[in-house]
Amino acid sequence: MEKRKELFGQSPYGLSSQEKREYYRQIMQELTRKHDRGCAPYHNLLRNIGFDPAISHEVEEYPFLPVRLFKEYELLSVPREDIIKTMTSSGTTGQRVSKIFLDKETAVNQSAALVRIAMDMLGGKRFPMMIIDSKSVIKDRKMFSARGAGILGFAMLGRDTVYALDENMNLDLEGVEAFLQRHQGENILLFGFTFMIWEHFYKILRDSGKKLDLSQAVLLHGGGFKKLAQEAVDNETYKEKLNEVCGIQRVCNYYGMVEQTGSIFMECECGRLHASNYSDIILRNPRDFSVCREGETGLIQLLSVLPDSYPGHSILSEDLGELIGEDDCPCGRKGKTFRILGRIQNAEVRGCSDTYEKR
């Protein structure tokens, strides 16, 4: 796909809205046709709704798959012997999980996009890295949970990487302090999932009265605030409380899902979530699925140019959001910016960290 190769040759936030639309018209058609040929359930869906993938359409007209379909069906568009990795979504006990099948090309493109997005937001070099999780999560390299996949994906951004939690999810304070001593005066990258950081890092430091100096660190976290809403913790509160226990100045949230690994939406210095060249969003009215205008609340439809091995290039999430603007962020990056407002009523609680259960 020549158009997609061109995207990887540019800055991940360099395309204007019109330039991006031209790319996506072609790429969405190519991916829809590919998955129509390779995935029988997807082919049947397109025929049942009367959609002809051979005809060029506007980006908003390409069909989306409700994210729950990945829990009900094994959707793949390449021969099963080409699959090198299977990703599973997070789920509480009793919930069905999504299975996402990756061939080599899809896995490589997802990793490349993730690194390019994160490097642009965090700076173009690898930092000493502390992962606020347990190394035991990444033991099975062929069958990844969303949590394990996130850890391995972001670990590529770091060097001299350490894990802050032991196998029992207890904070290894001695190991953390040794790491900080080793990299005193350096910029440090911290990574973890929103709820895990709150439960196993922030609360432990708060209750112990122990103060760490992370004033030169950047914290990257994802997984959502759904469970923290029970404690009245939002994005701003989260940042304030972490600053109190370790002096951290920059906390960067990101939004994404296992069904579109790699094409994440990261929070810039101005506090906006950004769509990169590799992904886009459309806000849909929950009543009739019409396209929302700027400032209207709608279901988030996620577009990605990365999935080759499964029909995940256009997915309707169960999250509600609001478009802030396009090509107008004070940080200077182009593309759509938006905020997450929560989940639709009665949707399953899911997320890389929010579904972690104590054992």
Image (tube, rainbow, N blue to C red):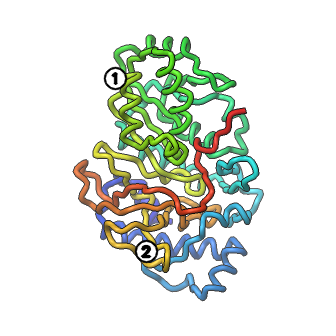
- Which dot marks residue 215? 1
Q: Pointer 2: what residue?
A: 25
Element type where label 1 sits in the image: loop
Is residue 191 depicted above or below 245 in this figure?
Answer: below
Q: Quadrant of residue 170?
A: top right
Asked whether residue 109 is in view, the answer is: no
Residue in the image at 66% along x and 54% along y: 102
Callout 1 amino acid: Ser
Is residue 347 depicted above or below 211 in this figure?
Answer: below
Asked whether residue 56 is in view, the answer is: yes
Circle 2 crowding by C-alpha within 10 Å: few under 14, some 14–19, many from 20: some
Is residue 240 depicted above or below 346 in this figure?
Answer: above
Residue 173, percent from left and from top: 54, 15
Residue 164, percent from left and from top: 56, 23
Element type where label 2 sits in the image: helix
Residue 94, percent from left and from top: 76, 51
The quadrant of the image that shows the C terminus is top right
